[in-house]
Image (cartoon, grey):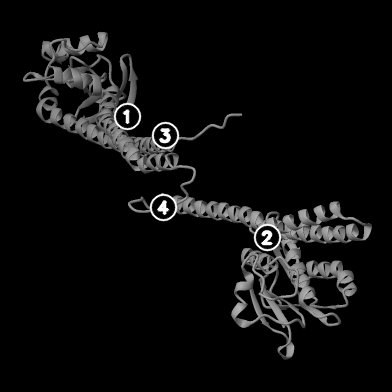
Amino acid sequence: MNMVRVSIRLLLLAGSAIILLGVLGLTTWLSMEAGRDEAGELFDARLATSARVLDSLMARQIEHATINAPLVMSLPAPIREEARKREHTGESDAEAPLAWRLQDWLFGHHDIETPLGHEYETHIAYQIWSDPASAGEGALLARSSSAPTVPFAPLRAGFSDHALEDGIWRVFVLQSGDVWIQVGERADAREELAAKLGWATGAPLLIGLVIVLLLTGLLIGYGLAPLSELAERISARRPQDDQPLSLSRVPAEILPVLRALNGLFERVRNTLERERRFIDSAAHELRTPLAALRIHAQNARRADDDAQRDKSLDHLLEGVARTVHLTEQMLAHSRAGRMAGETAVSLRDVVRDAVMQRRPGIEASGHLLELAACDDDCSLIADPTGLSSVVGNLIDNAQRYAPAGTAIRVTLARSGGDALLSVTDAGPGIPVELRERVFEPYYRIPGSAGSGTGLGLAIVREVLERLGGSIALKDGPAGIGTCVELTIPLTGPVATD
């Protein structure tokens, strides 16, 4: 099944667009709501002001006049015609300037403003009525041409909204003496103005959003360019090139990736070097025993009697045993560098099992094998096979070099967060000047009588380095023999006294 790969560039762009749209949308909506409220208050104030102006200039003069028909104030013909055309057809003036037509597309049609007046005058109307309480029946004294012949609203002072044939009207009613003045404004004029304010606010923001996203895309591409360069550098590397990548002029965000890659290259380089050394050492170390096996086999084949043949076969079997042991040690040394299969393990149980497995062979060789282990299980995360190899190699070394009839003592104790493991023998000891060299693979002390491979202590140190532990070589009790002391970090709870 193909996994869907997420593009960092697309994710950043989409995230930026969503965040900006959300913030700008909320800001625009809040601005429109605030503008709608403020515009409503301004429009209401204008209605009240218009009513008072009518009261001062007109209503008082016609209050006691004899009027056979209502006075009608008409708007100039061009304004009425343009308003009628837009109301019924929605068309704009084809001869309008280009800037106006662009504004029509972005914000709605451009309002007609001439020396004769403004198109919005068609959305405002007024009526002057006589007071029914004094005249017996209220009569329409005057009105604008855009006002109906019936009252906008009941003759009750104050603001109110009323539905007429041509829509909802916002009406302000003012009583002045024996007349009532009603000034109304169509609600759609307010909505149209609010929409224009919204467009006027939102359109530049929308255009700015597109520009910001384009610039953000370019900036993201520039910021991600080092990743592409890094991929090209890695792809162009030769298989044998294991040198670390340069960390100069690298963005801080990519620096951890490069450091991790360099760490990986270092581990791969060490692994390959270890494998190369293993192959070289195997070829070198196996050449001599295999040549000896060949000679013993040839001698057995050419033997003239059974006694000579049996002697050659015995030498052959001894050589095979040494070669098998050498091969096993070489493989153990190679595995020690990998330490696969790490799990929770009890060091005490590992030590006890290793001692029990080797006790019969140790006692058969005339040695004594003693164990003194603490009650704590000394738990840690490790490869059980590697730990067993550590204990086994130390015991085998002690058996190989200690005189028959002497004791080999294995001790396990706990000190804080560490386990202390020691193996002591009564052998010839290790000279101080050679105590570092004995950890080198295949190194054997000159003149030593044992038949070791020179890999035992190398395996022990390899495993300990993986565990973060340490190893020290000391003289045995009273300066006789060797004491190998290991310090191994544990993962269990720290013991308290």
Mark 3: amino acid: Leu
Identify the residue at image location x=87%, y=74%.
365
Q: How many marks?
A: 4
Q: Return the residue nearer the eye: 302 or 340.
A: 302
Q: Position of residue 71 (x, y in %)?
A: 14, 15
Q: Residues within 10 Å of mark 3 (few under 14, many from 20)?
A: few
Outermost residue to the front? 304
Check disc 3 and report its element: helix, strand or loop: helix
Up-down relation of residue 442 to residue 182 (above or below): below
Q: Earlier in the sequence, mark 1 or mark 4?
A: 1
Asked if disc 2 and disc 1 are in contact, CB closer than 8 Å, the reply is no
Locate the C terminus by quadrant: bottom right
Q: Residues within 10 Å of mark 2 (few under 14, many from 20)?
A: many
The reply, left or right, for residue 415 in relation to residue 90 is: right
Q: Earlier in the sequence, mark 3 or mark 4?
A: 3
What distance separates the C-alpha of mark 2 from that of mark 3? 50 Å
| Disc 4 target residue | 255
| Disc 1 target residue | 160
Q: Return the residue nearer the eye: 171 or 131.
A: 171
Q: Earlier in the sequence, mark 2 or mark 1?
A: 1
Q: Earlier in the sequence, mark 2 or mark 4?
A: 4
Q: Position of residue 447 (x, y in %)?
A: 69, 76
Identify the residue at image location x=63%, y=63%.
466
